[in-house]
């Protein structure tokens, strides 16, 4: 699955700082480089846009609607996207440290090569999403609803999946040592024999050599 908006000429890209002055509905724009800081733009709509090497600092996009949007090597760390709706959105090589996507709807979202440490995806409703080569260390994916979701070669050290049913989720290529979840949530997940050793601590068993 590749989620890419229509081709936009980056040579005519607008400075990302202009995002703070744009209207509530932004369509067919390319934003490249630069930093946008301390803007409060809840409930805006962005469609068929590309963000390239842009930095967002201390921004509030609560309730934003993103459709056919690509973030390419952007820094979105510690920004607020809670209660948002993302449809056909792609994050490539992005920094998403501590980014808040709580209570958000992900539909056909693809993240690849992203640093998602401490990300908050709790209470997220995900459908047809793929996460490839992402680091979810100490992230929160608790109380999520997952439908046709794939994790490929992801790091999940101390990632919290509590109250998230992993039925049918294939974790075989990911690092799950230290993952945090309830045994009942693990039922039906696909893992390797060696990964089962990483989950022994969930049984309250102490393994000594």
Image: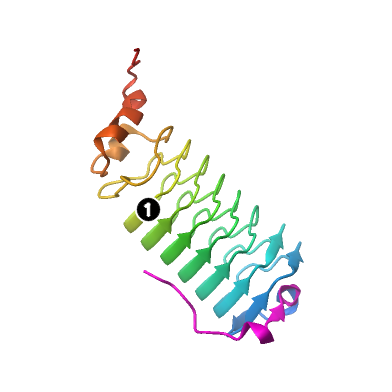
Q: Position of residue 129 (x, y in %)?
A: 38, 62
Tell whether position 155 is magenta.
no
In the image, what residue occupies the spot 68% across and 69% down?
Answer: 41
Question: In which quadrant will I find the N terminus?
Answer: bottom left
Q: Eyeballing the image, is 124 above or below 22?
A: above
Stretch of the chain drawn in magenta: 1-18
Asked whether the viewer can see residue 182, the reply is yes
Question: In which quadrant will I find the C terminus?
Answer: top left
Dot 1 lies on which element? strand
Q: Which residue is mark 1?
A: 152
Q: Position of residue 184 (x, y in %)?
A: 28, 35
Q: Position of residue 169 (x, y in %)?
A: 29, 49
In the image, what residue occupies the spot 60% across and 70% down?
Answer: 43
Q: Quadrant of residue 63?
A: bottom right
In the image, what residue occupies the spot 27% across and 44% down?
Answer: 189
Q: Position of residue 6 (x, y in %)?
A: 49, 84
């Amino acid at each position: 699955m590749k989620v890419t908006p229509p081709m936009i000429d980056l040579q005519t890209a607008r400075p990302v700082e202009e995002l703070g002055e744009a209207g509530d509905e932004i369509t067919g724009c390319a934003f490249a480089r630069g930093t946008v800081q301390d803007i409060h733009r809840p409930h805006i709509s962005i469609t068929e846009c590309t963000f390239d090497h842009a930095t967002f600092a201390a921004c509030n996009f609560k309730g934003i609607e993103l459709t056919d949007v690509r973030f390419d090597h952007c820094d979105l760390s510690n920004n607020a996207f809670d209660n948002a709706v993302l449809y056909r959105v792609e994050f490539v090589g992005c920094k998403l440290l501590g980014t808040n996507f709580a209570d958000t709807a992900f539909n056909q979202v693809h993240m690849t090569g992203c640093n998602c440490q401490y990300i908050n995806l709790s209470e997220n409703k995900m459908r047809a999403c793929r996460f490839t080569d992402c680091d979810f260390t100490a992230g929160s994916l608790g109380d999520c609803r997952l439908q046709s979701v794939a994790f490929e070669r992801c790091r999940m050290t101390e990632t919290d999946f509590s109250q998230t049913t992993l039925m049918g989720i294939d974790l075989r290529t990911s690092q799950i040592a230290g993952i945090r979840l309830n045994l009942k949530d693990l039922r039906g997940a696909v893992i390797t024999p060696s990964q089962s050793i990483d989950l022994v601590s969930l049984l309250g068993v102490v393994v000594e050599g």
